[in-house]
Each structure stands twice: as structure tokens, then as C-alpha cells.
Image: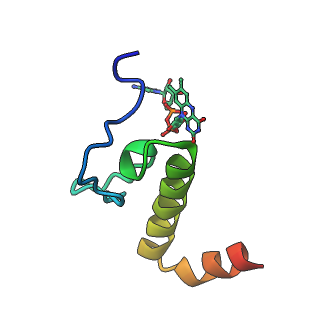
């Protein structure tokens, strides 16, 4: 199963940027750890990045906590 998962070399960068220089937001296991947890967490980070850039980050954090 070549390319089934992103490689997990040591040392591994655990938090790759979810904002690209071109302004595109990306998420997936290739941004965090190659796992479902990594994919989900990167999705949250990407959503938070979008909301932060839109000036709505505080609103989202309140919703997540409540
Ligand atoms: C055999 C196997 C077993 C695993 N077991 C576990 C486990 O037990 N626990 C665990 O935590 N993780 C496990 N993983 C890892 C986990 O499945 C992945 O890390 C996780 O699914 C990654 O989610 P993702 O959303 O980043 O990418 P993906 O789930 O790969 O989703 C990417 C999606 O993008 C689509 N896509 C790709 N290119 C394009 C394109 N050009 N245009 C449109 N769509 C496109 C693909 O079809 C796919 O639907 C396993 C992986 C494999 C292969």
C-alpha cells in the first residue's frame, strides 16, 4: 500500500501550517500525525485559522467549549 499514509519520520514535524502562502487553507493527516486523530485535529486548526483570519476566533472557541 504505497502512499497509503504520510511518512512519519524522526524527527517529525507534528504541526505543519494549515495556511499556505497562497492563502489556501489545508487540513488532513499530512498536517499533523498520520492518523484519524491527526486528521481531525488539523481540521480544527484549519477552521480556527479561517475564523481567526475573519476576526471570529473568539466566537468559535466559545461554541467549542460550551
Ligand atoms: C489500512 C489503514 C488503516 C488505518 N488504521 C488507522 C487506525 O486504526 N487508527 C487511526 O487513527 N488511523 C488509521 N489509519 C490512518 C487514517 O485512516 C488516516 O490518517 C486518515 O483517514 C486521514 O484522513 P484525511 O482526511 O487526512 O485523509 P483521507 O481519509 O485519505 O481523505 C482524503 C480524501 O480526499 C480524497 N481526494 C484525494 N485527492 C483528491 C482530489 N484531487 N480531489 C478530490 N478529492 C481527493 C480522497 O479520495 C479521500 O476521500 C489507517 C490508514 C490505513 C490506510
Q: Position of residue 59 (x, y in %)?
A: 63, 80
Above-or-below relation of 35 to 40: above
Q: What residue is rendered at 44% in x and 67% in y?
A: 49
Closer to the camera in the image, 9 or 27:
9
Locate the C terminus by quadrant: bottom right
Q: How is the image coloured?
A: rainbow
Above-or-below relation of 57 to 6: below
Count the marks: 0
Residue that extends furthest to the top in the rendered view of this protein: 1
Residue that extends furthest to the right in the rendered view of this protein: 66
Please indicate whether residue 19 sits to the left or right of residue 65 in the image: left
Q: What residue is rendered at 27% in x and 55% in y?
A: 20
Q: Position of residue 43 (x, y in %)?
A: 52, 54
Closer to the camera in the image, 13 or 48:
13
Residue that extends furthest to the front in the rendered view of this protein: 10
Locate the N terminus by quadrant: top left
Q: What residue is rendered at 37% in x and 43% in y?
A: 30
Q: What residue is rendered at 26% in x and 43% in y?
A: 9
Please indicate whether residue 38 sits to the left or right of residue 31 in the image: right
Q: Position of residue 48 (x, y in %)?
A: 50, 68
Q: Position of residue 44 (x, y in %)?
A: 54, 61
> Which quadrant would residue 28 be assigned to in this image?
top left
Amino acid at each position: 500500500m504505497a502512499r497509503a499514509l504520510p511518512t512519519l519520520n524522526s524527527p517529525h514535524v507534528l504541526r505543519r501550517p494549515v495556511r499556505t502562502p497562497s492563502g489556501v487553507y489545508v487540513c488532513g493527516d499530512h498536517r499533523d500525525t498520520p492518523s484519524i486523530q491527526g486528521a481531525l485535529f488539523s481540521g480544527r486548526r484549519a477552521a480556527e485559522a479561517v475564523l481567526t483570519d475573519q476576526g471570529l476566533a473568539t466566537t468559535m472557541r466559545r461554541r467549542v467549549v460550551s
